[in-house]
């Protein structure tokens, strides 16, 4: 779910007033062996939220990784086997935990 800048400001304000942590999610498809710079930029921001006490969720979409989800693209991605997706997901997890606190 995407939120507008104004909605985000309101959520942050409410979180500060109620001392309830935000829930922030990043979903990625393991369509390549390694995460890319675009992922890292967002993960650094997630880490900042994490350090402020908010709950973050890093979701690896194995099914969409297999079917080659074309969202926002002019052509479909190559379909990957279950084994390729699982290997990519393991690598994504290893790389993400270099930035995000898994606990």
Image: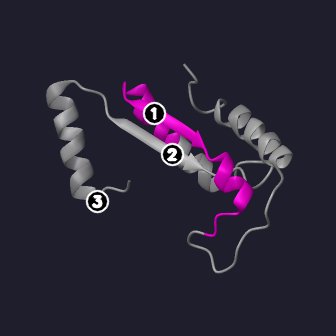
For the record, the magenta segment spans: 44-70
Query: Which one is earlier in the sequence, the residue at label 2 or at label 1?
Result: 2
- Report how many numbered discs are placed on residues in the image: 3
Tag shown at residue 3: none
Residue 80 position in % (x across, y down): 81, 57
In the displayed structure image, the side of residue 75 where residue 8 appears, left or right: left
What residue is drawn where x is 65% and y is 36%? Answer: 96
- Whole-number angstrom distance, CA of label 3 to CA of label 1: 19 Å
Q: Which SS class for mark 2?
A: strand
Q: Quadrant of residue 77?
A: bottom right
According to the picture, the residue beneath numbered tag 3 turns out to be 4
**Gap between marks 2 and 3 measured at Cα:** 16 Å
Residue at the limit of the structure toward the top, as seen here: 103
Pick whichever of labels 3 and 1 is earlier in the sequence: 3
Q: Pointer 1: what residue?
A: 56
Q: Nearer the viewer, residue 8 or 84?
A: 84
Residue 89 appears at what percent x and percent y? 73, 41
Residue occupying the point 70% across, 73% down: 76
- Where is residue 103, by image quadrant? top right
Magenta stretch containing residue 60, yes or no?
yes
Q: Is residue 29 above or below residue 83?
A: below
Asked if labels 1 and 2 touch by Cβ distance under 8 angstroms, the answer is: yes
Please give the name of the residue rendered at 77% of the width and 48% of the height, measured from the top-left corner.
Answer: 34
* Residue designated by label 2: 26
Report if the CB atoms under discs 3 and 1 are less than 8 Å apart.
no
Q: Given the current orientation, which residue lies at the most extreme bottom position?
A: 74
Magenta stretch: includes residue 35: no
């Amino acid at each position: 779910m995407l939120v507008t800048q104004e909605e985000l400001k309101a959520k942050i304000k409410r979180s500060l007033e109620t001392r309830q942590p935000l829930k922030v999610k990043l979903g990625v498809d393991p369509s390549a062996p390694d995460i890319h710079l675009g992922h890292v930029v967002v993960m650094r921001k997630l880490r900042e939220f994490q350090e402020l006490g908010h709950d973050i969720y890093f979701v690896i979409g194995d099914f969409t990784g297999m079917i080659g989800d074309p969202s926002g693209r002019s052509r479909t991605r190559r379909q990957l086997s279950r084994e390729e997706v699982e290997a990519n997901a393991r690598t994504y997890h290893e790389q993400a935990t270099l930035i995000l606190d898994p606990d």
